[in-house]
Amino acid sequence: MRFESSIDIDAPADRVWALIDRLEEWPQWMPSIKNIERVSQGPLASGSQLSVTARVSRITVRLLMTVVEFVPERTVVMRGSALGTNLTRFYKLEPVNNGTRVTVGGEVSGALALLARRGGQAISAEIARAAKKRVEQSE
């Protein structure tokens, strides 16, 4: 089950990427994200691992996510699982006009896929809106 949300941000990709790359700061501007920690050392790259704690509806979920695809200023794809459900999460940036289109989404499968899809869609839309607000207000 796939889900995604896109939004156009009035800023170049490098400014939007800077926000995405500072994952540990996400809880400051994303109410659903409670904590993100880098488990592996060094900059974000393929193979990096992150511990993510998020609140979806009334449930708090902790995931160990592994970055499986990484293209600076373009794409981050990560995978993890919790409660018998597999999650792939992606963040894609593409230039449009004088700004950047950000697409946030993922795919879920397994025991709680329907519930995870609903929660994933809601968080994807929240991330897209919050990123737009954060980047455009920091000008």
Image (spheres, rainbow, N blue to C red):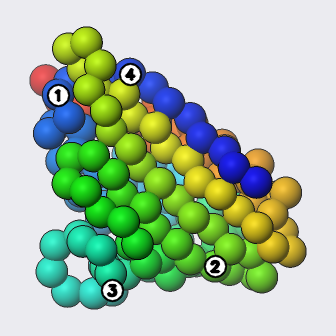
Question: In this orientation, which residue lies closer to the viewer: 107 or 114?
Answer: 107
Tell me residue 63's x, y (percent).
56, 77
In 3D space, how far apart are the residues under numbered discs 4 and 1 (Cα atoms)?
A: 11 Å
Tell me residue 49's x, y (percent).
37, 81
Q: Nearer the viewer, mark 3 or mark 1?
A: 1
Q: Earlier in the sequence, mark 3 or mark 1?
A: 1
Residues marked 4 and 1 touching at CB (< 8 Å): no
In 3D space, how far apart are the residues under numbered discs 4 and 3 (Cα atoms)?
A: 31 Å
In 3D space, how far apart are the residues under numbered discs 2 and 4 (Cα atoms)?
A: 30 Å
Q: Could you tell me which secondary element the residue under label 2 belongs to? A: strand
- Can you say which quadrant of the picture contains the N terminus? bottom right
Residue shown at the point (33%, 38%) measured from the top left:
93
Q: Earlier in the sequence, mark 2 or mark 3?
A: 3
Amino acid bearing label 3: Val
- Can you say which quadrant of the picture contains the C terminus? top left
Q: Could you tell me which secondary element the residue under label 3 belongs to? A: loop
Tell me residue 116's x, y (percent).
75, 60
What residue is pinned by disc 4? 8
What residue is pinned by disc 3? 39
Amino acid bearing label 2: Ser
